[in-house]
Amino acid sequence: MAVNPGDAEADELPSMLWGLDPVFSAYSRLYITDILQIKESRQVPGVYFYKTHPIFKVDVLGTVVYKREREDFYCYGVDDSTGVINCLCWKYEKCNDQGASAKSRDPSGSSRGFNIEDELKRLKEAEQMSTVLEIGDLLRVRGTVKTSRDAREISATSFYKVNDPVMAVQISRMLEMPQLYRKCYDQPFKPGDDLGGTEAGGSSRFHYLLSRSVLTLKEFFLEKEVARFRPYDVEFLLHPLIQSSSAEQESDQPGTSFATQIRNLLKETLSVLQDEGQIFRKIRTQDEVYNVTEQDKDLHTAIKDVLREDTKREKYAEKGCHVLHILSSVRQRYSQNLSREMLEVALTFLECNSDIISTTESHYTVL
């Protein structure tokens, strides 16, 4: 996964196009060796390039191999087995004031039923415990990439200790990372030039059309509460996009027909929506039918049934069910074609509707 040092200079795109790359706004799950090697942008300090993708936020998981404590922050050395990077993690504010406030309101120290200040104090203490690590602990960090004194480091926006006694989290990430590289990071930030004339102009125009196309379909699904559709049901929504693009670039596309442009744009749009987990195919047949994740009531029922039944078991009673367990169970009940991205979209939707609740970052239970 190592980066060619010349890639950034050779392929750095204008900064005005960076927002069209989904990688730019996400926390990129790169190997630490790649974070250490990516080149800083010549246009905007603090932004780096992995191949053609602009990056400034990363998500790493690794073992703490050294620790330095200062008054306001910790410096953790994190090792993911590909390299070691310094992570600057600011300390959380202590909750002594809140505790004193709670005691002053109840001098006897007794608790009459539920006391929200006591509960907040306990939550703060638990949060603090999860952010104080020792050498050998597993740490997950999300933050921005910085270069300080010619050394690459991560300035954390969030970080916590990961309890992973049977290495389930590490194994899951180990399996996920190669797929992310293959399907996303190693793919050039140029989906295709089928809608354009010149190489540079066509690529940027395609990115613009693709982002608008994805947004158009998402808004249509939400507004019309679409649960299932076939490609030809939504093709008409893309016609105005192609027509306006063709009008602006008439001289650039003498050899690409309108039907071909529509077909290529629709194919890429559906691919993006599938990768994001917004849509999926329950059954893979010649009749190309897609289900919309947030509108599929049968899928939602299957997820809630799994959680309702399995959280009654002692094994899952306290923390709830892990997302991988839910995925396996729902695949058996509903469809073998479900992806983790799709499940996470559905879980987020159900949690927003107060049908379920997350007990940790990866565990869920019913309300």
Image (cartoon, rainbow, N blue to C red):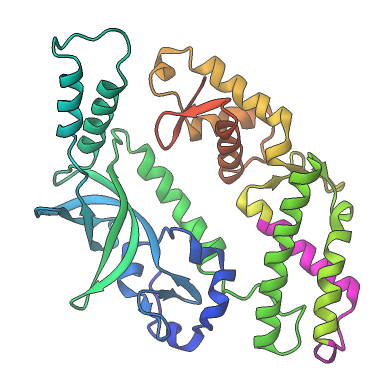
Look at 64% across and 40% down and name the residue there.
338
Q: Residue 255: within the magenta?
A: yes
Residue 191 in percent (x, y) is at 66, 72
The magenta-colored residue range is: 250-272
Residue 7, placed above or below residue 159: below
Residue 36 location, quadrant: bottom left
The residue closer to the viewer here, 157 or 264, is 157
Question: Is 306 displayed left or right of 89 in the figure?
Answer: right
Q: Which residue lies furthest to the front in this view?
A: 105
Q: How many numbered circles does the render carry?
A: 0
Residue 270, placed above or below residue 195: above
Residue 2 location, quadrant: bottom left
The residue closer to the viewer here, 155 or 284, is 155
Residue 286 in percent (x, y) is at 86, 48
Q: Residue 185: within the magenta?
A: no
The residue closer to the viewer here, 354 or 280, is 354
Residue 311 in percent (x, y) is at 48, 17
Question: Is 282 displayed left or right of 87 in the figure?
Answer: right
Question: Is 174 displayed left or right of 149 in the figure?
Answer: right
Look at 38% across and 60% down and name the residue there.
58
Look at 56% across and 42% down and name the residue there.
340
Quadrant of the image for the N terminus?
A: bottom left
State the predominant SS element of the stretch in magenta. Answer: helix
Question: Is 202 displayed left or right of 362 in the figure?
Answer: right
Residue 192 in percent (x, y) is at 69, 76
Look at 70% across and 75% down and name the residue there.
206
